[in-house]
Image: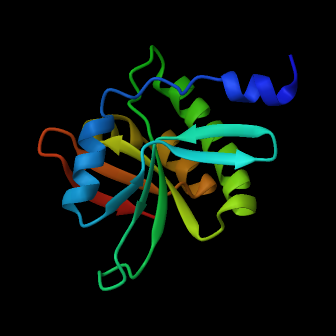
Amino acid sequence: MTDERRTATWRMPKLDFIHNSVKNALIKDGWSITDDPYIIQYRRTMLYADLGAERPIAAERDGQKLVVEIKSFIGASKMQDLKEALGQYDIYYYLLEETAPDRKLYIAISEIVYNIFFTQDVTQLILNKHQLPIIVVDIEAEEVTQWIN
């Protein structure tokens, strides 16, 4: 099988269970969802980030474009989930630099995960060193509660 055929036959990953809540929260926050999923294609490689979003020119964040990767952090180890999220973030970031440098990449998480895990000292150290942009979402209210740059 050729590389092109392998790429074409890859399946889209399964949606995180908080996907629709994050999507609805972004819409409530004034974002237009442009891609669900957002396809990152670099040469023969195709990857799928969860969402692409844009803010209208007249809005507060004039014409800003986002790519959002949604993470539930429901694995057996939150630290393992974080390692995987950071690796995925890096891969997407590097590819977006080449293919869509006008888009800013964010990781979206629930407010519960933020309060329980992302406020811990070790997690804060890692996030500060990595400078990971995060969108924190109240999943039940479907509202963005924090933008962390």
Left or right: residue 111 compared with residue 52:
left
Left or right: residue 89 compared with residue 6:
left
Residue, x 69% and y 47% (percent of image)? 41
Left or right: residue 60 compared with residue 62:
left
In the orientation shown, which residue stands out farthest toward the right? 2
Q: How many marks?
A: 0
In the orientation shown, which residue stands out farthest toward the left? 141
In the orientation shown, which residue stands out farthest toward the bottom? 58
Can you say whether 62 is above or below 109 in the image? below
- Tell me the colour scheme of the image: rainbow
Residue, x 81% and y 31% (percent of image)? 4
Q: Position of residue 48 (x, y in %)?
A: 57, 38
Left or right: residue 101 compared with residue 17:
right
Q: Position of residue 11 (x, y in %)?
A: 58, 23
Q: Look at the image and tell me whether residue 93 can be seen.
A: yes
User: Which quarter of the picture shows residue 9?
Assistant: top right
Residue, x 56% and y 24% (percent of image)? 80
Q: Nearer the viewer, residue 84 or 77?
A: 84
Q: Look at the image and tell me whether residue 119 can be seen.
A: no
Q: Nearer the viewer, residue 47 or 81?
A: 47
Q: Position of residue 58 (x, y in %)?
A: 30, 86
Q: Nearer the viewer, residue 72 or 101?
A: 101
Q: Quadrant of the N terminus?
A: top right
Q: Position of residue 130 (x, y in %)?
A: 62, 53
Q: Nearer the viewer, residue 65 or 130?
A: 65
Residue, x 23% and y 52% (percent of image)? 25
